[in-house]
Image: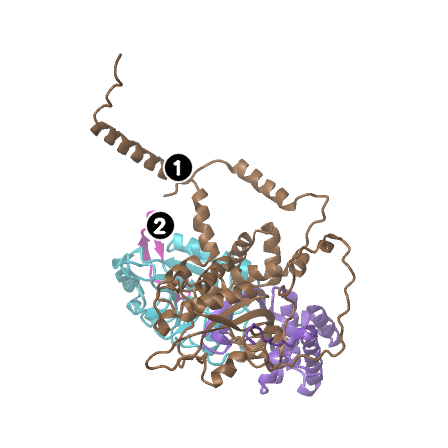
Amino acid sequence: MYVAVKGGEKAIDSAHRLLAEDRRGDRRVPELGTDQIDAQLGRAVDRVMTEGALHDRKLAALAIKQAAGDLIEAIFLIRAYRTTLPRFGYSEPLNMRALRARRRISATFKDLPGGQVLGPTFDYTHRLLDFALEDEQPAAEEPTDASNVVELPVDMPRVLEQLARDGLIEEATPPTNEDTREVGDITRTPREFPADRDERLQSLVRGDEGFLLALGYSTQRGYGRTHPFAGEIRVGEVTVEFEPEELGFAIELGDITVTECEMINQFKGSAEHKPKFTRGYGLGFGHVERKAMSMALVDRSLRADEFGEARDAPAQDEEFVLSHADNIEATGFVEHLKLPHYVDFQSELELVRKMRAEIEARQPDPKPEAAE
Amino acid sequence: MSAVDTLMPDMLLKGFDDPVDAGGRAFRALLDAMANPGTPFSITCPAEHPAQLSDAAAAVLLTVSDYATPVWLADDIASTDVQSYIRFHSAAPLTDDPAAAVFAVVAQGFEPLMATRFNTGTEDYPDRSTTVIVECAGFTGGTPVQLAGPGIEGTTRFAPHGVPLGFWEEMQMNNAGFPLGIDVILTAPGHVCAIPRSTLIEVN
Amino acid sequence: MPITTGDAAATPARSLRQRWISACARTDPDQLHILADVLGIDGTAFDVLRPAENGLVMVRGRAGGTGQLFNAGEMTVTRCSVRGRSGHVGHGYVAGRDKTHAELAARLDAHFQAQPDDTTLPIVAELEQQIGERAHARQQKSAPTRVEFFTMVRGEDE
């Protein structure tokens, strides 16, 4: 129970002023522009968009600035802002075959039609601090050796579709009742258990990267092993289409950057089914590779029932995973412990005193130490 | 639920000039009306409204309905114009079932209201009932009734004209079912007046 | 140079109106301003039916890229609807929160509807060309990062 407390307005105002001053930091240092955050802290922006569940780079950059770089606080700001806007509707499904990939790798096939494209990646860096970045004047960019560069093809076939053609992996079949079935939307209907995969995926996209990373890692270490391979990871731009009711046809709204990960997982097969690979899916706004991979691992783990697997590891426990993946829900409940619990605690304090008194009353008085 | 299959783009009308500000003022008028049953209040109206709908009824719909509130329209109101107008400005789904409606609009005329066809809520959630917008010709000149109850100091006399046949008797029955029942917003050009389920009615 | 405006290539049956609304959404608002000026579009010649407003569109994905639908997250979208002197109603829907962009797009939609298609087609084609070139250029920056991996035989038993 929380009781309202009065007073403290002046102190709270002062605390907010101090927060603003603290956020601004040393005034001899130029103020950070949101365009700089967007351009130069892009991965932070991507994370805030994905877990804030709202694609808007400028808003995410603003939130990061306001939150002084506290990304969960920034995500909180985005989630709160989103509630002030009307929902125009649902987009057409993203056409991921038409993704203009700037990065596209597979750990399962080295020779891909369209090729492996590293794109901008931290992979293969030596994780050595680059002190040159401390300089205000950045070094001149080295021109890329443009000789022998072959243009990327517009069409890069999806790796898993090739496997699916041979029947070696489960199809990513659209449900047959697609036209009639409502697609679950946890922003409209509170989640219930058991959840369908659509609701699970929606929860996972906005789920905390650290939480999903740890869960994904746990499956690799044997807690619900799924034997994963990174079938394909793509980062690139896709055009979002939307059909406004007053037009009656779909139009393009603009391009967004997304990251997609398809995991290939082993499945032993059963009496009825020949062995084939299974899949887990990860998707996020911006370049969020670690997140997409973690999501794909957890998506696959949560499908345990579909494949008749025992559900005994944390990553396979749907209620556990989905109830704790949202960092805004989590931080709300953890941080609420800071709110006044004075009456609550007083009653517990009295109870403990009473219990102690009762025990003491039942016990004979301690014998006085040997007198004299 | 029936969606409008084809909206007629060239017949689309303007809504509120400034949806946020005007919508806020119209909402204030509705709050005042609900808090003072039987007292007419002027309401901020949209710049344009379909002919089958009064400006006040249009104002109420654009203010309170949205994608999550199914709207039912009486047959003589359910023209393509009105349907397009609601879909375009408030995105409320249109329903054929009065019991499924969160908001309903009944045209001015002598047809009985048939209050029981609407959703009167449940014992657990009496608030999940239909709010019915009843169009009438004006708030004076009709058969006077005496109103009492929450929001009314003592009693007040009210004499709208052009209300549905047997309207007050139905409203008495509606009140008798309290806490279940519908809430009614009477609309006349530029004005609204509320008769919530809590209002006691005495017909002279 | 292969030009693609995203999914456009996959859906050949798009109407010209569909194409110009899409192109206006994906063109920089500064550029749309210039275009509107060139076309002599007078901002005062429009009745605003639904003023520019910010809102959300829920982006849908598919499990595995091609399978079951799910809601991935929302994006900000701004829309506006106007009626031109000709009586044509124009709609603008653009990603982001730029109300001027949505308003310009709505005016252009109303304007183009009142024009013969063969006047509009080259303008739309030009916009699409520029959109395609930008998208292409962005993607092709990754072309030099294409890699050939070679598997090496390891082991001591050979």
Residue A149 horizontal side relative to residue A6, left or right: right
Residue sitting at the far front:
C157
Identify the image quadrant of the N terminus of chain A.
top left
Identify the image quadrant of the C terminus of chain A.
top left
When the figure is inspected, residue C136 is found, relative to residue A202, above or below; the finding is below
User: Could you say which chain is coloured cyan in the image?
Assistant: B
Question: Which region is colored magenta?
Answer: B134-158
Q: Secondary structure at mark 1?
A: helix
Query: Is B152 contained in the magenta span?
Result: yes
On the image, numbered disc 1 is attached to which residue?
Answer: A342
Q: Residues within 10 Å of mark 1 (few under 14, many from 20)?
A: few
Q: Nearer the viewer, residue A348 or A297?
A: A297
Instruction: Measure the C-alpha gap from mark 1 to mark 2.
Output: 42 Å
> For the stretch drawn in magenta, what is the main secondary structure?
loop
Q: Nearer the viewer, residue C1 or B69?
A: C1
On the image, numbered disc 2 is attached to which residue?
Answer: B152
Q: Residues within 10 Å of mark 2 (few under 14, many from 20)?
A: some
Residue A352 horizontal side relative to residue A248, left or right: left
- Chain letter for mark 2, please: B
Residue type at mark 2 is Ile
Q: Position of residue C121 (x, y in %)?
A: 68, 85
Q: Position of residue B33 (x, y in %)?
A: 42, 55
Query: Is A186 contained in the magenta span?
Result: no
User: Could you say which chain is coloured brown in the image?
Assistant: A
